[in-house]
Amino acid sequence: MWLNLKKRIWKWRGVFVVVPATTGVLLWLRFLGILQPIELAVYDLFFQWRPSEPIDERIVIVAIEEPDIKNFGSPITDNTLARLLTLIKQQQPRVIGLDIYRDLPVPLEYGSEYQELVNIFESTPNLIGIRKVVANQEGSDVAASPVLEKLNQVAANDFSLDGDGKVRRILLSLKNKQGKTIPSLSAALAIRYLQKENINLEVIDPKVQTYRLGKAVFSPLQEHDGGYTHEALGGYQILSNFRNFQGGFRTVSLTNVLNGNIPQNIFRDRLVVIGITAESSSDYFITPYNGTIVKGSFAATSGVELHASIASQLIANAIDGQPTLKVWAKPIEILWIAIFAIAGGLLCWNSRYARPIKQSKITLRLPWITIAIISLGVSLFTTSYIVFLWGWWIPVVPSLLALVSSAMIVTGYTAFSANEARRRAILSVIPDLMFNVSGDGIYLGMINYESKVKLVYPDFENIGKHLSQILPSEISDRHLFYLRQALNTGKIQIYEQQICINDTYQDEEVRIVVSGSNELLFMVRNISERKQAELAIYKKNAELASTLDELKTTQKQLIESEKYAALGSMVAGVAHEVNTPIGNSLMAASILDNATNKFKEFFDRGELKKSSLEAYLEKTKSSSEILLVNLHRAAELIQNFKQVAVDQSSLEQRSFQVKNYIETILISLAPQIQHTQHRINVCGDNAIVIRSYPGAFSQIVTNLVMNSLTHAYTDLDKGGQLQFELTQQNDKVIITYADDGKGIPSKNLARIFEPFFTTARDKGGSGLGLHIIYNLVTQNLKGTIFCESEVNVGTKFTIALPVDLSCD
């Protein structure tokens, strides 16, 4: 039985430790008063959430507002006050509360006006005046009217304020300096009003000052009741349970009463309170309804409205049975807080054994603990609010903190325990040999005894020995050197070593980590297999490097072959283009030779005539003109071809007209084009000139055209339209080359600039044409090239080159 009990205690050890500690700390914080501001804020929030009530018709306020002060002055004169009281008395109210200090006549003379007011005071037994019992900041109180004091018709005008300046406690009575008990104005008005209902204040228990007033029972507020801690509780105080009158009380102004502009019998059989509501009076207080926690909170409450509100609460307590606000005894509060600490701790501790929720074959890991804690917290808040409406103020903040903090602490403890268990499990499967060594080099023992790394020395027999006593000098010296490095730098030390165990060499990687103030952790890993793999990889990399060098050489040779092929095409173009003017020149020379021979025959025979001479001169002129034109054309072509040839073999920059240069290059490609139906057009401004490498430019144009002739029109029975279009944009020349061939499939478009990629290898394609173009554009000419293509529509290359390459 004891064994089972021990198991259960161990199983729930987190709850048994965390819950009492959490509850104790929170109670300590509560009784220190640290939680009081938050608890009072929740108290105010509950008031602001309270449902609104209809206006209390039993109370009427006569307000002295700003216009009244302008009309009658401040304070109002004795004559004005006498007229006001006379008009109110005519409607026979139950009780009149005068929330105006009247210790001196106004004006300061004891004349007929003052005597008239005195007569009113003496003839109005249901009139209650005020005095200030508790001294103000200047250290003085305010006396009551001598007449009302003599008639014992005076009440205290004091309020009990919390540390934040709010009125949350109701002062029913207090003692003056002479020890006389003086009721508060609100309590005096309420008790006087209730006397007509045959409700009088009854003493239930004089020892604890418990009183009954109709259906209400009042007990004085104690120092630690509710959320209060060490609050000064002078006089007889109870907790406020202000009613929520969103529309306030029925209010009439002083001017309207004096002018008779009030509803008939508005004061009859009612509690009437007279006071100043003008903002200039500064007679304003803050209640739980005043604040910004809830949108629509009331503005500050004037003193006369606060007296009316408290009197309304007391009357409703006595007649309507509205509950007074009560609190639990301290043991019950402590138990309540502990219950939520236990609930949070149990939920999180029990979650260690919960299984994931499975739904539709998919494991769904819901944060149900979080949801449960939030739900319980919301339930606590909701329950506290409902109970508050029933008249009980129960602790919300400490209970909520107990729930959350116990859950968090238990979760942290659980996580720590789980981490410790995982740490042990991880250590058991780590392949490294792990042992501790002191800063002096003393061996402290292994950590993971299940390691598969072979030991050079036994473990338990060597604990407490120096490394130099256990290991060979070479190994121990190396360990001690890196041990000191780790201690001096604080950084992890990593090095490799090779040891011999039973005539077998083993490669090891050693890591040294500082694990304490004078302790280091050694981690030794067998890396023999890794070393063998690294050696194999090194050999393979060497083979790959050699193969790559061979491929680069082959690629260079193929590129040179492409270059010479282009030169060969140019030579063929030269032969073709120069052939025509040379042939024409030969024909003209032949005609001239025949004419000369005939002319000589005529001359030798002496038969030379004028007509023969004229015919000979005509043929000579015609032939010489043909010779001159064609030889000039041949010389021009040869000069252009020579320039292109020089450009292709030269690495120098020069300026050239782009359009004219492209046309010259195309002439050299005539042998490849003339036997096809394709046509090449060059469009653009003749004035566009760039400074660049003309040889690279020539190879780009040649490769573009040859790429189209090789690939774009294969198996197409139509003549193609190939076009170069030139434009200049700021410091860039845009060359757009397009054909209307069969296009490039989208799957190949991204690879067209790759070396050796071709779809016509069986037809002699090398796959280097566009690769050469890309390199020449981007590397040599510092430009960009972009290709667009659509199957059965054609292909377009857009090349942007700098106007002056020497500036880049």
Image (cartoon, rainbow, N blue to C red):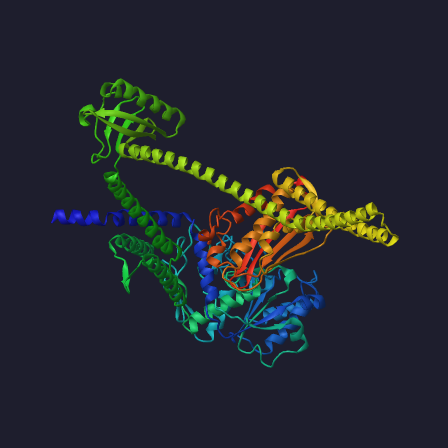
User: Residue 688, how many percent across, how many down?
Assistant: 71, 50
Taking 214 as reference, is 640 left or right? right
User: Residue 237, how many percent across, how many down?
Assistant: 45, 59
Q: Nearer the viewer, residue 162 or 805?
A: 805
Looking at this view, name the residue that lies furthest to the front.
605
Looking at this view, name the residue that lies furthest to the right.
610
Numbered label tally: 0
Residue in view at x 25 percent, y 43 percent: 421
Q: Quadrant of residue 375?
A: bottom left
User: Residue 624, how many percent across, how many down?
Assistant: 78, 48
Residue in view at x 39 percent, y 71 percent: 215
Q: Is residue 687 above or below residue 240?
A: above
Q: Nearer the viewer, residue 548 or 320?
A: 548
Q: Nearer the viewer, residue 586 or 683?
A: 586
Q: Is residue 136 visible?
A: no
Quadrant (top left, top right, bottom left, bottom right) of the C terminus: top right
Q: Nearer the viewer, residue 669 or 177?
A: 669
Q: Is residue 472 visible?
A: yes
User: Residue 655, how many percent across, how many down?
Assistant: 70, 43
Residue in view at x 44 percent, y 36 percent: 549
Looking at this view, name the residue that lies furthest to the bottom.
264
Taking 6 as reference, is 367 left or right? right
